[in-house]
């Protein structure tokens, strides 16, 4: 979860985080950029199209869907950042593991010529060139593979750096950043259109929607079980109000105890978890195999010894690939959570 020192680099500017939260410094300049989900302020002489795209990417990666840049407002969508391929896609790169999984579900894995380092599914990606971690993709190595299209992501803060890098290269890109399970189904369709595989994409998306509808019907009438889902332990990160994980937890029969926190991925403290007193805790750390997760260590954190989930022994690791990747396998992730939640009900 460590982040590069450079926040992003545009055609003209190298931007890095300044000392105060939400402030950023442009190399060679004294005036600061001030960025938040509510408003973004940039010295006018620094603002150009590439910097505006980078700031829009920054907002989207944190769950925002509205730009308020120097008091000019407009709505945002990940598709606003797309750059269409100029030829039929024969050489495809994915720089998020969820994107590679969507490609695999469409039967298009043979088109992939490179992936980011944590991509491990479908099996066809295992032998492909690795382009570095998803928060710091090696743009030179990516460009050397001469892709017709890059499938990018803004599902995690920090990924805006990759969008700015692809903009500098001028490469065609498709940007995915879903906030709901239906958005994920929509992303399957978007990828299908870009690859000219619309029929396959409709089949996958329709099957996902049918399964989600069935799961929704099954859980109705049951009181939801309070759940804490942990994406990272230090600092502690969990889904906020703008993340598809809320729906996954709900369809499994639970309720995210931090569903009211603003953002896609939000930081919490042990005291917050203790106050919420979840009955189930799921550990699904980004990029960490489940056999490396030790549920007993949760009880060593200040104030968590008396949390209901800890006392009942319901601190359960689930592979991050099933809970943290917005792709077709979210269905399997819901099923894994539902099994634990049913046991919690007794």
Image (cartoon, helix red, strand yellow):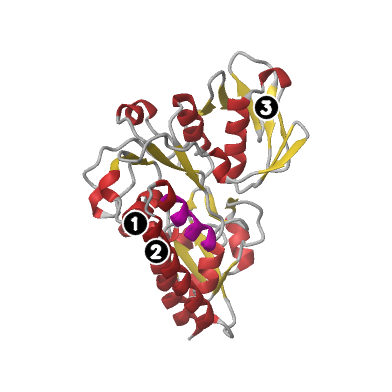
Query: Distance between the Cα atoms at labels 1 and 2?
Result: 7 Å
Asked where in the image residue 330 lies, by quadrant, the reply is: bottom left
Residue 286 in view, yes or no: no
Residue 305 shown left or right of residue 295 in the figure: right
Could you say whether the residue bearing mark 2 is in a helix, strand or loop?
Answer: helix
| Residues packed near mark 2 inside 10 Å, few (<14), some (14 to 19) or many (20 plus) | some
Q: Earlier in the sequence, mark 3 or mark 1?
A: 3
In the displayed structure, 5 sits above or below 299; it is: above
**Of the image marks 1 and 2, the number of the one nearer the N terminus:** 1
Whole-percent x, y for residue 334 in the image: 44, 70
Q: Position of residue 65 (x, y in %)?
A: 65, 47
Q: Cβ–Cβ below 8 Å for labels 1 and 2?
A: yes
Q: Quadrant of the N terminus?
A: top left
* Local crowd size for mark 3, using a 10 Å CA cut-off: few (<14), some (14–19), many (≥20): many
* Residue occupying the point 62% across, 51% down: 263
Task: Give the camera-side residue of 43 and 92.
Answer: 92
Cα gap from disc 2 to disc 3, whole angstroms: 42 Å
Give the main secondary structure, helix, strand or loop, of the magenta stretch.
helix
In the rendered structure, the answer to whether residue 198 lies left or right of residue 164 reads left
Identify the residue under disc 3: 33
> Where does label 2 land, which residue?
204
Q: Which mark is residue 106?
A: 1
The residue segment tinted magenta is 181-191
Secondary structure state at the residue bearing disc 1 = loop
In the displayed structure, 147 sits above or below 123; it is above
Q: Residue at x 60, y 56 (%)?
A: 240
């Amino acid at each position: 979860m460590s982040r590069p020192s450079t926040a992003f680099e545009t055609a003209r500017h190298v931007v890095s985080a300044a000392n105060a939260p939400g402030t950023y410094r442009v190399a060679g300049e004294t005036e600061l950029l001030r960025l938040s989900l509510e408003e973004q302020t940039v010295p006018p002489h620094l603002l150009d199209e590439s910097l505006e795209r980078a700031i829009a990417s920054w907002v989207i990666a944190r769950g925002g869907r509205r730009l308020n840049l120097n008091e000019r407002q407009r709505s945002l969508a990940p598709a606003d950042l797309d750059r269409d391929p100029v030829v039929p896609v024969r050489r495809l790169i994915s720089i998020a593991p969820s994107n590679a999984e969507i490609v695999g579900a469409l039967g298009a894995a043979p088109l992939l010529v490179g992936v980011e380092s944590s991509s491990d599914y479908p099996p066809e990606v295992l032998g492909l060139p690795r382009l570095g971690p998803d928060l710091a993709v090696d743009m030179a190595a990516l460009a050397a593979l001469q892709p017709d299209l890059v499938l990018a992501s803004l599902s995690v803060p920090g990924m805006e750096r990759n969008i700015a890098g692809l903009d500098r290269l001028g490469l065609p890109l498709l940007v995915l950043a879903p906030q709901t399970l239906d958005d994920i189904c929509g992303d399957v369709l978007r990828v299908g259109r870009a690859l000219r595989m619309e029929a396959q994409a409709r089949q996958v998306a329709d099957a996902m929607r049918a399964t989600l509808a069935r799961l929704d019907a099954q859980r109705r009438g049951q009181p939801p079980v309070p759940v804490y889902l942990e994406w990272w332990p230090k600092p502690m990160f969990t889904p906020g109000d703008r993340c598809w994980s809320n729906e996954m937890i709900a369809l499994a029969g639970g309720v995210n105890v931090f569903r009211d926190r603003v953002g896609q991925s939000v930081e919490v403290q042990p005291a917050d978890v203790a106050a919420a007193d979840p009955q189930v805790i799921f550990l699904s750390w980004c990029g960490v195999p489940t056999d490396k997760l030790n549920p007993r260590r949760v009880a060593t954190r200040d104030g968590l010894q008396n949390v209901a989930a800890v006392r009942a022994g319901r601190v359960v690791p689930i592979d991050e690939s099933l809970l943290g990747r917005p792709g077709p396998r979210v269905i399997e992730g819901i099923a894994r959570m539902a099994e634990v939640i049913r046991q919690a009900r007794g």
